Amino acid sequence: MKVASEHKAFWSAGHENYPDQMRPDGFGGQLFGPKALDGITAVLNTDSSDRFAKPSDRSWMSSTYPWTGDRRHTKIGALAKTYRGLIILKTPFDLALYPRLIWELQPRTIIELGSCQGGSGLWFADNMSVLCEKPGEVHSFDLYTKLVHENAKKHPLLTFHQVDLADAANFDEKLLVSLPHPWLVIDDAHVQIFSVFSYLDNFMMSGDYYVIEDEPVFANKEIIDGFHLIEQAGYLVDTYYTDAFGTNVTCAPNAWLRKS
């Protein structure tokens, strides 16, 4: 099955270039934990022999009714999601929300923190090219850029940068100053999220958006304190996005943030 080939490419690139990080305590363990492996295995071992079926041969019952989808388990399906053959770790809800925001905001710059295989960066670049009247630039930052697939690197609007996000000072300040606004920043790296936010905030303007994926779901003291900092910096939660499918039915609960 064609969709499985790039999962295998990612797995091979990880072991070849970052063997230590492919251990359970590295990004390999984070990306390929038991639930993630279930999702990837579902792609690798898909039996497509019954892919096409007559309507009369199928039940009309749905395993996940759309209006109660927020009560169901979608993680495995999201972790198995691909775009143009590349891994894209986004929930179906967020895949529906981002195009809506890109259309509304018309960003000139999308900054992605965390590149993985480049699938999400490619998806953002394609969405920008279709939805923006003046397509801008997508810049994706990650330490492990050797995992980025060559097919993602070919997109004319998309650039990958090798940066250790453990220290926000590693960003190229001249690059950030040069990037046109409005900005849409997506933090999917989960590395020093609030220090990175504080640094990038220095370059952001009123109306720019900052989305923090995954981490806010924990809502521990660190998260609460960090969001107090965000609120003090003048950011507001855009509930048009956080609550589109129900209260905080998104991988970024309370974290679709607009600079006021």
Image (cartoon, helix red, strand yellow):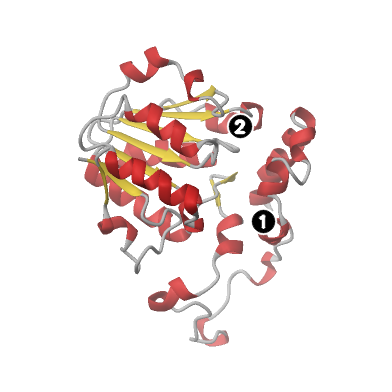
Q: Position of residue 232 (x, y in %)?
A: 28, 41
Q: Residue at x 61, y 63 (%)?
A: 76
- Mark 1 is surrounded, within 10 Å at the Cα level, by few (under 14), some (14 to 19) or many (20 or more) other residues, namely many
Q: Nearer the viewer, residue 49 or 140?
A: 140
Q: Residue at x 60, y 56 (%)?
A: 79
Q: Quadrant of residue 17?
A: top right
Mark 1 vs mark 2: give the one in front: 1
Q: Is residue 3 left or right of residue 67?
A: right
As drawn, 141 above or below 230: above
Q: Callout 2: helix, strand or loop?
A: loop
Q: Position of residue 173 (x, y in %)?
A: 40, 15
Q: Callout 1: helix, strand or loop?
A: helix
Q: Residue furthest top?
A: 174
Label 1 vs 2, first from the N-terminus: 1
Q: Is residue 87 left or right of residue 93?
A: right
As drawn, 157 above or below 91: above
Residue at mark 1: 36
Is the Cβ of the residue at disc 1 closer than 8 Å to that at disc 2?
no
Q: Residue at x 72, y 40 (%)?
A: 26
Amino acid type at circle 2 is Val
Residue at mark 2: 148
Q: How many marks?
A: 2
Amino acid type at circle 1 is Ala
Q: Position of residue 47 (x, y in %)?
A: 71, 66
Q: Residue at x 51, y 74 (%)?
A: 72
